Amino acid sequence: MKSFEEKRNLLLEMIAFSTIDGQLHRREYNFLLLIAQELNINKDVFNDLFHQELPQTPLKSEFERIQQFYRLALLMHSDGTLHAKEEEAIQQISLNMGLNPVATNRILKIMKSGSSPIISPDRILSIFQEQHN
């Protein structure tokens, strides 16, 4: 990611999604804090993001949209509990991103049914590429 604004928007979207079930679990907060640290955003700035509104800025490339979808899916699984509101929200978000619903549903099903929600990047990309054919 290039700019602070892009990093901030990414975190704002993830924060908004993490509270869709009405709660912010400690594991979700820690996951978001880890991402903030990887993006070189200090804890004070990160904590301030919880009091800001989510801007409407579309992600540019399909690859960026897939990455953001997967980050949100990981966040959804980070607290160990899948809420119906989270599942509905991530499906709507992925549609709004213009991602193929067959591919996103398949990824969500794989994440839900496996012992770990982690999927290799190559597998994620191949699932989306299958839908292009």
Image (cartoon, rainbow, N blue to C red):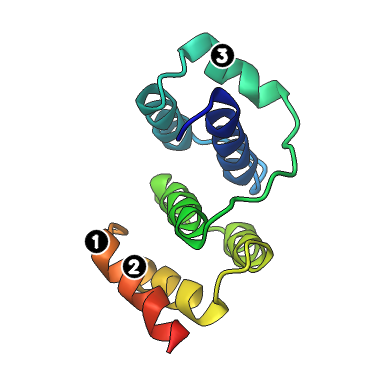
Q: Position of residue 52 (x, y in %)?
A: 72, 25
Label drawn at residue 45 = 3
Q: Where is residue 33 in the image (x, y as percent from the top left)?
A: 43, 26
Up/down of 35 relative to 110, above or below: above
Label drawn at residue 40 = none
Label drawn at residue 120 = 1
* Callout 2: SS: helix
Q: Residues within 10 Å of mark 2 (few under 14, many from 20)?
A: some
Up/down of 28 relative to 99, above or below: above
Between the C-alphas of marks 3 and 2, the distance is: 31 Å
Q: Which amino acid does label 3 sit on?
A: Val
Residue 123 placement, left or right of 54: left
Look at mark 2 in the image and give the residue it sits on. Answer: 124
- Image quarter hosting the N terminus: top left
Q: Is residue 114 visible?
A: no
Which residue is depicted at the point 63% across and 68% down? 98
Between the C-alphas of marks 2 and 1, the distance is: 6 Å
Up/down of 132 relative to 94, above or below: below
Residues tagged 2 and 1 counted as in contact (Cβ below 8 A): yes
- Image quarter hosting the C terminus: bottom left
Q: Earlier in the sequence, mark 1 or mark 3?
A: 3
Q: Position of residue 64 (x, y in %)?
A: 48, 53
* Callout 3: SS: helix
* Callout 1: SS: loop
Q: Which amino acid does label 1 sit on?
A: Ser
